[in-house]
Amino acid sequence: MRDIIQMALHHAQDKSDIVSQQPVSGGSINESFFVRTARQTYFIKHHPNAPENFFAYEKEGLELIRSTQTIQVPKVYAHSDQPGRAYLVMEWVEGEKNSNTEYELGQGLAKLHQTNAARHGVHHDTYIGTLKQPNTLYNEWVDYYKECRLKTQLEIGVDLGSLTGRRREKLERIITDLNQFIPKEIKPTYLHGDLWGGNWLTGSNGKPYLIDPSFLYGDRHFDIAFTELFGGFSKKFYQAYQEIYPLSSYYDDIKELYQLYYLLVHLNIFGEMYGSAVDRVLDKYAG
């Protein structure tokens, strides 16, 4: 592993001596390390079996968020998707929360969501976890959500055997009737795409940072719905968001429908422990 870290640092134009390195928690997908050189500190992620363009897409998502100048993301110094030697080299972000951190997080996300794009989706495939997420661009959000999100997870679930019988029938019914639930006129905005409580952290001076995006353009309520699924966001966060960009009146009607996508992803990755949560949403929208 030290050879890969050394290679990654050289790629990042840091040929100084490694002072220390240690593994850190970084999710269940990658091997992650805190690395200190004579020059500075880094966060380096390595995936021994990374799929095609795995870190390139993460780097692109971070840079697109950074380009809006609305909320902080870590700097990316280098990446590689070479088989067996895939890595991402980023700045090490560390700090203590203060009384304004989560308020600033809500404000920053609201400002990110005020950044508009021309169409919904992404011009290339991405990943949610290690599941490949096919993408293309659509004029209408409902068409993108139907074709690229729900249908994709349906196909994966059928292949895995996690979506069968009545569960499959109900999901197919929801997909068919999706236009009844989601408004047609929705502006495409910049989205993080994988915004659970583990994908933001605190940097120096209590500044919030977004990490690990699965970037797309779409309905801003899609991001907000996921923040409410597993927790990790305070009342201050939602208060600050609402002050900048109040949620639309239809949000409560479609919140669980947007959460369904993430529950299907978890069902297809982690198994039946998420089955009852999927069934609850299917029952609500498909009877």
Image: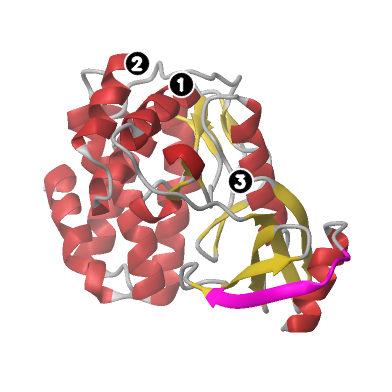
Pointer 2 with pointer 1, Cβ within 8 A: yes
Instruction: Give the numbered dot on residue 244.
Output: 2
Disc 1 crowd rating (10 Å Cα; few below 14, some 14-19, many 20+) is some
Of circles 3 and 2, the one toward us is 3
Answer with mark 3 or mark 2, whichever residue precedes in sequence.
3
On the image, numbered disc 1 is attached to which residue?
A: 111
Q: At numbered mark 2, what does the secondary structure look like: helix, strand or loop?
A: helix
For the residues labelled 2 and 1, the Cα–Cα distance comes to: 7 Å
Lateral position of residue 169 relative to residue 61, left or right: left
Q: Earlier in the sequence, mark 1 or mark 3?
A: 3
Q: Residue at x 16, y 65 (%)?
A: 276
Which of discs 1 and 3 lies nearer the camera? The answer is 3
Query: Is 192 above or below relative to 273?
Result: above
Mark 3 lies on a secondary structure that is: loop
State the predominant SS element of the stretch in magenta: strand
Q: Amino acid at mark 1?
A: Lys
Give the camera-side residue of 17 and 141.
17
Q: Residues within 10 Å of mark 2 (few under 14, many from 20)?
A: some
Does the magenta run of residues contain 17?
yes
Viewer-proximal residue among 276 and 168: 276
Q: Position of residue 96 (x, y in %)?
A: 39, 48
Between the C-alphas of marks 1 and 3, the distance is: 18 Å
What's the mark number on residue 74? 3
Q: Which residues are magenta?
A: 15-23
Quarter of the view holding residue 184:
top left
Mark closest to the chain's N terminus, 2 or 1: 1
Q: Is residue 76 left or right of residue 258?
A: right
